[in-house]
Image (cartoon, rainbow, N blue to C red):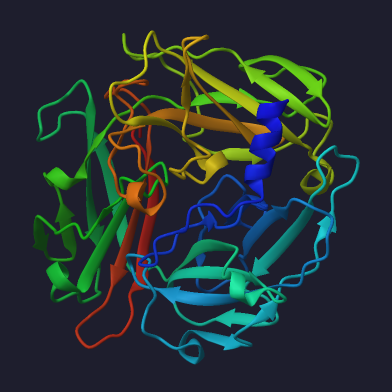
Amino acid sequence: MKVCLLLLLSLLLPMSSAAESAYRTLTLDGRYRTLQVYPANSPAQAPVIPLQGQERIQIGFDELSHDYHRLTYRVIHCNADWTRSELNELEYMAGFTQNDVPEGTPSMGTHAEYTHYSLVLPNEQVQLKLSGNYAVEITDRDEPEAGPLLWACFSLLDRQVGIDAGVSTLTDAGYRSETQQLEFELKTGFASIERPDTDLKILVRQNRRTDNQVVGVRPSMAGSGVIHYQHRPELIFDGGNEYRRCDFSSYKLGGLNIDRIVYQKPYYHALLFRAEPRLTGYTYDEDQNGRYLTDTRQGREEVDVRADYFWVHFSLALPRPLERGALYLLGEMTENRIDEETRLDYNDETGCYEQQLFLKQGICNYLFMYADSTETGDAAWNAPLSSRPAEGSYWATENGYQIFVYYRPFGARYDRLIGYTEISSRQ
């Protein structure tokens, strides 16, 4: 209980500050949790919608109290690399530059008190005029000096090119047993892209992660109406391993990978079975590539305010601590953050790396990832993460790859998103 109280106190402290150079979906204050951004009514999909049409982006998050807060938001247009663009707000949006987040709804029948907030974009107050990347910055109107509380990122697509993509295990690096190589071609049709080397900007992600994303891939060849991206060493990714899964959507019945559920006043605790390293070979599993879905087994009605928060206990058995570096829990449940909250500590008594997270009831995917550094926050964000010390890396692993194609011809002032696709390595 003492450990739990100390961890609870840590929730009231600010999380590690985010890099000023680029936006990403991230909570910046420990009082705010379970930030999720997705197309409305499609929580498993990436937050990319057409510029024109009726689709909307749903942003949801919790504040860990029933206190009243006047939250405001502003929408920021970003470049292909998620840095702030040079456009002013009048150029990319119609409506007010700063607006109130709709009033939150207090949780009902839960041991953890929280208030759930929900925001949909575009809306009556904000209409967006240009394609590209957007970051929503949310602050407390009564505490502006505290800075932003969270960022929520999404993209608007004005499709101008088609994308044919595939993943090969016969990579140019030659490491068939461990890596995958992405190849794709853009079909421009009648669109004129005179300088694909400079006018196009390509961003590639694996399983929607940003720590190993690739920005600025150059084409290997351009022909009549087709631009090829083949045999590019920067498009070689570790295959990694299938995400581990757990289901703590019920406080009565243990779900997948749950050893037991116990109540220690004032919260429920979900203790996962002790995990073992997966270094002896690949084992097939049906994961969801890092997704996190809030849910209660009692039904999905009003899950946003009726799902409780659990302390979820993770452990990984290793005979001795690592000589250097650190292990982290990676997945959308932690916004793929690398910080003190997601770092595991070695327990000599149990022979395990351990950590517990305060998570909203649901189903989540996660990996134990290694960083060759013990620094956290901004200093660790760009440090290479590796699955190999705990999860292994295998060519057969199913991964999702996201390809973003941005276009900025000579003289233009912003990056248009003209192409997007998400493919599986098993396609």
Q: Quadrant of residue 313?
A: top right
Image side of residue 260 versus residue 220, left or right: right
Q: Residue 37's quadrant in the figure?
A: bottom right
Front one among 344 and 288? 344
Q: Residue at 50% of width from left, 14% of height from top?
A: 275
Residue 347 versus residue 363 in the image, above or below? above
Residue sitting at the far bottom: 90
Asked whether 221 or 224 is in front, the reply is 221
Residue drawn where x is 27% and y is 34% of the image: 372
Foreground residue among 81 and 370: 370
- Position of 44 compared to 394: left or right? right
* Residue at 22% over, 69% down: 200
Where's the N terminus, which quadrant?
A: top right
Looking at the picture, how far across and down is residue 366, in whole percent? 50, 30
141 horizontally vs 240: left or right: right
Q: Is residue 189 above or below residue 2?
A: below
Task: Give the x, y percent position of residue 162.
Answer: 32, 59
**What is the count of numbered marks?**
0
Image location (x, y in percent) of residue 56: 62, 65
175 vs 81, left or right, is left
Q: Quadrant of the C terminus?
A: top left
Instruction: Give whichever of 389, 146 is nearer the camera.
Output: 146
Residue 130 at x, y percent in the picture: 45, 80
